[in-house]
Amino acid sequence: MGMFDGRKVLVLGVANDRSIAWGMAEALHREGAQLAFTYLNEALERRVRPLAEGIGCRNVYPCDVQSDEQLDTLFARLKEDWGTIDGVVHSLAYADKEDLSNRFVNTSRAGFQLALDVSAYSLVAVARRALPLMTDNGGSLVTLTYLGSERVVSNYNVMGVAKAALEASVRYLAADLGEFNIRVNAISAGPIKTLAASGVPQFRDMLSAFAEKAPLRRNVTQDDVANTGLYLLGPLGSGVTGEILYVDCGFNIMGS
Ligand code: NAD
């Protein structure tokens, strides 16, 4: 018996097998969940589809979260194929590379809007469309954030601002959707080497500094995050909503 037997979960944000979203998907699959995946573009479809098929999943849909039309089509197809859903993993973000390497003060209006649109507004857009499908005793949404939302982290820049907006959105959505028994939470993960992380300059240095300072004296793994994802998405987290939960080997508690 798996903890997610009979539950249907939509996973947004797989780019490859190193993606945090993929770690979550594998854990959910192990626990019996039925899964659906999205991919951003055709190049990524070539990576996502074989991964999904490898765990027996054929529900794979295109979705660029900047497009309302694609979001509408995604949820219309989910309604057709599944009827209802129980959970959503929102594990995606984007900012222009130069906005991560230049001084923050030079962030352009377009760069600011892009980072906020993809990385924060998309959670609101997804939650609104998931709501009418979460009719089987509610549901749970989990997103991914990072400490750069509340502390200044070198080279995180506009993405830190986007994560702050994302975390506030988690709280407002949790308050809005609680009456439908829909929970909304975020995992604040420590640095993990993924495609998105490779866009952050000096990421390797960040990894080693992190492992040195974190109480657990190591870096965070995909599995660490996935385990907490299971807790927040499933019955064990039934009373938890609006929270930003650190999965960072304790890094955030440390002073200088
Ligand atoms: P990743 O590159 O594997 O995943 C990022 C995903 O975002 C990709 O699948 C990409 O296709 C998707 N994406 C980007 N723009 C999109 C758009 N317009 N529409 C739809 N999808 C889009 O990297 P990851 O590290 O697994 O990132 C997942 C989440 O975890 C992100 O929110 C990231 O900020 C967060 N996070 C990562 C770390 C880390 O160190 N890797 C730490 C804390 C939080």
Image (cartoon, rainbow, N blue to C red):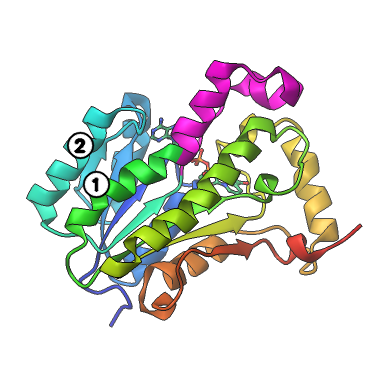
Residue 122 visible in rendering:
yes
Residue 13 visible in rendering:
no
Q: Nearer the viewer, residue 243 or 8?
A: 243
* Mark sitting earlier along the chain (2/1): 2
Q: Is residue 179 left or right of residue 142?
A: left
Q: How many angstroms separate mark 2 from mark 1 (CA)?
A: 7 Å
Q: Residue at x 53, y 51 (%)?
A: 168
Magenta highlight: main SS:
helix
Where's residue 160, x and y in %? 65, 39
Q: Is residue 229 left or right of residue 37?
A: right
Which picture quadrant has residue 175? bottom left
Residue 152 forms part of the magenta stretch: no
Q: Residue at x 51, y 33 (%)?
A: 116
Q: Do the residues under discs 2 and 1 have CB atoms within 8 angstroms?
A: yes
Task: State whether residue 30 is above or below residue 53.
Answer: below
Residue hosting label 1: 129
Amino acid marked by disc 1: Arg
Residue 115 forms part of the magenta stretch: yes
Q: Which residues are magenta?
A: 92-120
Residue hosting label 2: 72
